[in-house]
Amino acid sequence: KQFLGGSFAMDMPTIDVQDIQGEYNGKLVGHLKSDDFFSVDKFAKATLVTKSATPIANAKAGSANYNVVADLTIKGITKEISFPAQIIIAKDKVIANAEFAVDRTLFDIFYFLLLLIMGFQ
């Protein structure tokens, strides 16, 4: 069996932060949902659609075994990305695991953090 492709949608209004608790959790989640970041009121869905998946020759068990090229759409903007993925094909399901970085500025996410650096003599 060989993986040929697939797609999935992310429900952006359900953004959840797991590593911060209390008041700051709500503030961060609200900020991520705002127009500074994902504009979830305007763009409730982000998608990843596979364009191609090429097996990696001699991939070791437990590591990436496919090179994937996909269209990632965030805030209505679609960009092609590529990344290695571990894809396991079972009888009735496909399990995919991948990590990749995304240049947020390509998707009109331009929040800047200003830092004040003070010098002491």
Image: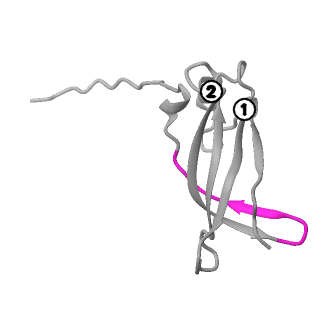
Majority secondary structure in the magenta region: loop
Read off the residue under disc 2: 38
User: Where does residue 8 sit, x and y in percent of width and height?
Assistant: 77, 45
Identify the coloring: one colour
Which residue shows up at 41% across the image and 26% down it? 113
CB-based contact (under 8 Å), mark 2 and mark 1? yes
Read off the residue under disc 1: 12
User: Does the magenta portion include 94?
Assistant: yes
Region of the chain picked out in magenta, as a range? 90-101
Is 105 positioned to the left or the right of 14 in the image?
A: left
Please, is residue 69 above or below residue 113 in the view? Answer: below
Which residue shows up at 64% across the image and 75% down it? 62
SS class, disc 1: helix
* Nearer to the camera, 13 or 24: 13
Please, is residue 27 above or below residue 97 in the view? Answer: above
SS class, disc 2: loop
- Quadrant of the rendered structure where residue 4 is? bottom right
Q: Which mark is residue 93?
A: none
User: Where does residue 84 sit, x and y in percent of width and height?
Assistant: 58, 61
Please, is residue 56 above or below residue 53 in the view? Answer: below
- Quadrant of the rendered structure where residue 83 is? bottom right
User: Where does residue 104 sit, x and y in percent of width and height?
Assistant: 51, 34
Which residue shows up at 61% across the image and 28% down it? 32
Which residue shows up at 63% across the image and 37% down it? 21
- Report crowding for label 1: few under 14, some 14 to 19, many 20 or more residues within 10 A (C-alpha): many
User: Does the magenta portion include 32?
Assistant: no
- Direction right: furthest residue: 92
